[in-house]
Amino acid sequence: MQRSSFLKIRFFMGSIGLMAAILMLVWLITSVLGLTVSIIDIFGMEGIRIPAGIAIGGLVLAAVGFNKF
């Protein structure tokens, strides 16, 4: 695999991770403002780990994807 195609894949994966984290942040803000259904209403207090895991996973994926080795 060539280095340039590896960098493109890393950039794509980083972009996907960043979009997932931004989506969770926007959902959190709009639910606090009452514009959408609350995250806690959907997942419950015990299930709040699911969207938190998606956000953290997205941030880790973005960090790996945008890191310059």
Image (tube, rainbow, N blue to C red):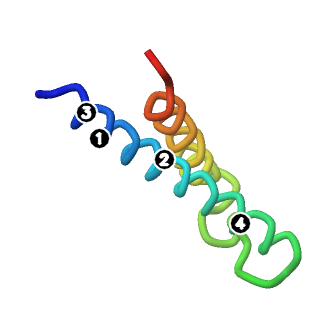
Mark number for residue 26? 4
Q: Residue furthest top?
A: 69
- Amino acid bearing label 3: Ser
1 vs 3, front mark? 3
Residue designated by label 1: 9
Q: Earlier in the sequence, mark 3 or mark 4?
A: 3
Q: Earlier in the sequence, mark 2 or mark 3?
A: 3
1 vs 2, front mark? 1
At x 44%, y 34%, the residue is 65
Residue designated by label 2: 17
Q: What's the CA distance linking mark 2 and mark 3? A: 20 Å
Are there few (<14), some (14-19), or many (20+) residues within 10 Å of tag 1? few
Q: What's the CA distance linking mark 1 and mark 3? A: 9 Å
Location of residue 29 in the rendering, given as x and y in whole percent from the top left corner: 80, 66
Location of residue 1 in the rendering, given as x and y in whole percent from the top left corner: 11, 28
Q: What's the CA distance linking mark 1 and mark 2? A: 12 Å
Q: Earlier in the sequence, mark 4 or mark 1?
A: 1
Residue designated by label 3: 4
